[in-house]
Amino acid sequence: MDAASRTDPPLEADEATTLRAFLDYHRDTLRWKVAGLTQEQLARTLAPSTMTLGGLVKHLALVESNWFEEVLAGGEVMPPFATVDWDNDRDWEWRTAADDTPEELMALFDDAVARADRAVDDAIAKPTGLATPSVRATRKGDRHFSLRWILLHMIEEYARHNGHADLLRESIDGETGE
């Protein structure tokens, strides 16, 4: 993956196509930021943070599964996240990413994205489209997220973390870019 092969969001399209394309653009940006790195490089931190590129990949796989499979569709998060004792280790995905190879991390991420896309396809096919409410309610329990809200939130989540990825990647090998 490189900058030239990223999804290019359309200049003119319907709302659902545009939102999904911008999400894919940010997913591809993360793929670009970790492309070609070794397991050791993916585990490298930039002081004072303990954040790593591998941790970002694993975290965003969890976020994809949480928002699309659990919150939107009402299922459970995908393996291996479903069996984690989150009460005892809130940062499990960040901490354990250093144990994973680049291939394992990217397979997990790509699986999470494919599963998320299926959940979005199912929701968008409903008559309510982007207004389809999530099965799970908000933390307050009185309202539900719309698919539109979740897609916009995911774009924001990736945009923020891709900024982190820029800094981490530059500290590893000097590679810079959008």
Image: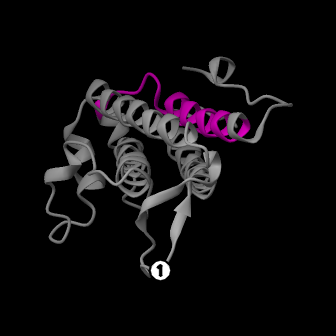
Judge whether residue 34 is colored magenta: yes
Q: Is residue 101 left or right of residue 138?
A: left
Counting other residues with Cα less than 10 Å from the Cα at mark 1, is it few (<14), some (14-19), or many (20 or more)?
Answer: few
Front in this rendered view, residue 174 or 37: 37
Front in this rendered view, residue 151 or 44: 151
The N terminus - image quarter: top right
Q: Position of residue 92 (x, y in %)?
A: 23, 57
What range is drawn magenta here? Answer: 18-39
Front in this rendered view, residue 157 or 14: 14
Q: Residue furthest front?
A: 127
Residue at image position (56%, 51%) is 154
Q: What residue does disc 1 label? A: 142
Q: Main secondary structure of the magenta part?
A: helix
Q: Position of residue 63 (x, y in %)?
A: 41, 52
Indicate the amino acid at tag 1: Asp
Badge count: 1
Q: Is residue 114 left or right of residue 160?
A: left
Residue 92 versus residue 11 in the image, above or below? below
Q: Position of residue 120 (x, y in %)?
A: 51, 40
Residue 116 versus residue 51 in the image, above or below? above
Residue at image position (19%, 66%) is 89
Residue 110 versus residue 61 in the image, above or below? above
Front in this rendered view, residue 102 or 40: 102
Residue 138 versus residue 71 in the image, above or below? below
Residue at image position (30%, 35%) is 40
The C terminus - image quarter: top right
Residue at image position (36%, 41%) is 54
Q: Position of residue 19 (x, y in %)?
A: 68, 42
